[in-house]
Image (tube, rainbow, N blue to C red):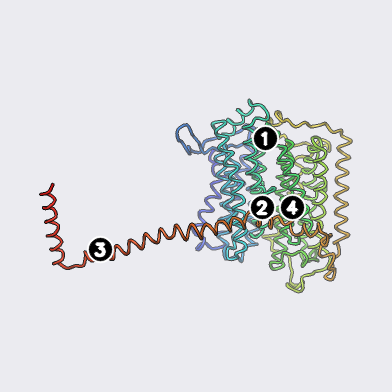
Amino acid sequence: MTILITLIPLLPLLGFIILGLGYRSIPKHIASIIGPGSILISFILSVIVLLNFRFSPFAFRFFDWISFGNLSISFDFLIDPLSILMMLIITGVGFIIHVYSVGYMSHDEGFNRFFAYMNLFIFFMLILVMAANYAVMFIGWEGVGLCSYLLIGFWFKNQQFNNAAKKAFIMNRIGDLGFLLGMFLIYKTFRSFNYVTIFDLAKTMSPGSGAITAITLLLFVGAVGKSAQIPLYTWLPDAMAGPTPVSALIHAATMVTAGVYMVARSGVLYVLAPETMEIMGITAMATMLLAAAIAVFQNDIKKVLAYSTISQLGYMFVALSVGAFTAAMFHLMTHAFFKALLFLGAGSVIHALEGEQDIRKMGGLKNAMPKTFWTFLIGTLAIAGIPPLSGFFSKDEILANVFSSSQPMWIIAVAVTMLTAFYMFRLIFFTFFGSYRGNGHPQFSNIHESPAMMTIPLMILAFLAFAGGFLNIPELMGGSRVLKEFLAPVFADAVKLNQIPHMPVPERREWFNIALVLFLVLLMAFRAFRKFGDLKPDDGNRISGIGARSIFGKLAENKFYVDELYDAVFVKPVLKVSGALHEFIEVKFIDRIVNGTGTLVVRFSNIIRYLQAGHVGAYMFFMIIGILLILFFNIIL
């Protein structure tokens, strides 16, 4: 079993090495086997690990990593229900997206390089979730940030894409600094980075301890950066500059959920820090509400899904903030299915429209692209929370947990659910219904369905988005919570130590809540249909979007000018200060010292070079002078 577990991350690494070293010489058809094939084998091995798992955490030391004084860090893996779930999501969804990428990237000159980066990302993501200590997790944490930078700026000939990649890298570094400081404080407090050791010692500490609060806040800063929460969320919409499969894999299904996984893994620490949980809840509510409001007014098909991702991540952090760790991981799983499906469906549309991403220039694609339409519709129904699709069950579990602990928070979560339904049905009506508004480029008659290499992955993800929720059907509906029982051992201590009170909700009230939310979701879908269901090229006001002429609409369409605010408050002052330092310190001080030293050496060399002019007579003269000087000093001394 140890060998199989070791191979799970090593196979994608091997794929990266082969494709990275031979990206200029390996034929595309070979790369299209190596790239997805390595992920497929890792997925099969992950399934084997699941089938052989006996509900007892399995940890093993891969090798001793750092040993210095009293500090000893080993490269350990931990296999438990939580890591297995993440391994299956990463390799399973990752493989599907890799297959899709074979068709989507088939004409790209960087085909091999793309799959090398994607394989490297899967490797680092697996390291992150399989780690048995925070030090090893940090390797994966930084690695996925690096791969995100490489993949966002994949088309590096476009400077705008390079700027988006730099923005993502820098904003993630801000969060990563918090994570790193949290690690230092963890070691100072517990003298270990190992999960088991830390959590066992933490259980003996009193709730609200200053050290625990500081640690969890710093770790949460890392999660805010990686999972795009306020204030470090603006990098994610710009990250849509990368190829669409990158958006599906990294910025919907896996990397951005790393923060959610880290908080869930550290659940014992967080339940002992109620102040941090409160801050997390406030941050998550503000994030999901702001992102959902912005998504309503976006016209770029990928930007709508990007802000939707930010909002759904906020949903997960709301669940974590009330101690509903299983609910958060359940929604993480279902979100990976339907959001990857939606991004790949958007990619199929963009592929058919020769790169067009503005939904105002789409429309009427339902019959031209039936497979893309039906699968995209399933993803929309799932994220909107329509039963019996997966999003309904995962959202219902979060809402039920939130309602039992904080009804005001529940109201905000329901409002976000309504906005989600509206902007997603707005998206689908703009894209697939009404009349084609593409101004003749490309010709509507030339628009056709994507190849099977792209539509088959859509169908598989559509099935998962439909059926994934059956893993955790609530007892209220006569189901068995398979996922909850599977993850129960991981979160047992956190649930036992949780300080947040949960009021029991009567069954009748729970049914009423479900019916109310479903009614509101359908109402918003109907509202979107009435507003955007039959758009025509001459419907200028309706195409511009609901409320786009209002002050709020203008603010939301321009993303509340948060990027401009950051640019004015942080970017421009830093550039001005650095420019001044360059001009007065670098150029006028440091450069003058360096250049002056070089000039002095050159001038001095020009003088003393005459000592080596090649004249034998001069050499004899200097020799005699030297002998006389030696004799003179010897006589005097």
Q: Are marks 2 and 3 in contact (CB under 8 Å)?
A: no
Residue ID at (83%, 50%): 418
Rounded to the nearest whole Å, what is the CA distance between mark 3 and mark 4? 73 Å
CA neighbours of label 4 inside 10 A, class few (<14), some (14 to 19), many (20+): many
Q: Are marks 1 and 3 in contact (CB under 8 Å)?
A: no
CA neighbours of label 1 inside 10 A, class few (<14), some (14 to 19), many (20+): many
Q: Secondary structure at mark 4?
A: helix
State which quadrant residue 110 falls in: bottom right
Q: Which residue position is annotated with label 3?
A: 608
Residue 462 in percent (x, y) is at 74, 53
Q: Amino acid at mark 3?
A: Ile
Q: Nearer the viewer, mark 3 or mark 4?
A: 3
Q: Which residue position is annotated with label 2?
A: 251
Q: Earlier in the sequence, mark 1 or mark 3?
A: 1
Q: Earlier in the sequence, mark 3 or mark 4?
A: 4
Q: Which residue position is annotated with label 1?
A: 270
Q: Nearer the viewer, mark 1 or mark 3?
A: 3
Residue 521 in percent (x, y) is at 85, 49
Q: Secondary structure at mark 3?
A: helix
Q: Which residue position is annotated with label 4?
A: 308
Answer above or below: position of 442 versus 571.
Answer: below
